[in-house]
Amino acid sequence: MKLKFELKLKFKLELKLELKLEVELKLKFKLEQELEVKLKLKLEVELKLEVKLKLTFKLELKLEVKLKLTFKLELKLEVKLKLKLKLKFKLKLATFLLPGNLTAKRRSVGACRSTVPSGFTAT
């Protein structure tokens, strides 16, 4: 920061004093001892005061700002994915009763094929 201050002062003082004094004195003397005195007094005073004042201000203000900004951005993305998948299958096997209270397990494969319902295949 720079601060500069300048003050200029110019001052002029003029003083005039004028004094006028005028005196008039008249004296008359007569033989009869009569005294006549005339006094005339004139006083004139002139006072003149003149002040001239000139003020100059100069103000210089300098402000210098240096700004340095540094940004550091670190972005870390960590994704942990745990997948648990449980599959449950229910398999129902039906046992078919064949004539004569015999199951398909005891018969031959050829005999079972004729007794399997439509849509299923016998193995």
Image: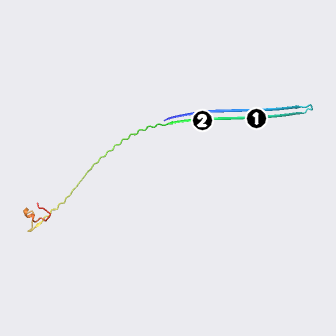
Tag 1: residue type?
A: Glu
Left/right of residue 19 with respect to residue 91 in the rendered view: right
Q: Position of residue 54 (x, y in %)?
A: 61, 35
Determine the CA span between mark 1 and mark 2: 36 Å
Of helix, strand and loop, which one carries label 2? strand
**Front residue of this view, candidates 112 and 21:** 21
Q: Residues within 10 Å of mark 2 (few under 14, many from 20)?
A: few
Residue that numbered label 1 is attached to: 44
Task: Name the residue furthest right.
Answer: 32
Q: Earlier in the sequence, mark 1 or mark 2?
A: 1
Placement of 78 over or under 94, stated as above or below: above
Task: Name the residue furthest bottom.
Answer: 100
Tag 2: residue type?
A: Leu
Among the 4 quarters of the image, the one containing residue 102: bottom left
Residue appearing at x 74%, y 32% in the figure: 19
Residue appearing at x 67%, y 32% in the figure: 14
Among the 4 quarters of the image, the one containing residue 99: bottom left
Q: Position of residue 9 (x, y in %)?
A: 60, 33
Residue that numbered label 2 is attached to: 55
Residue appearing at x 79%, y 32% in the figure: 22
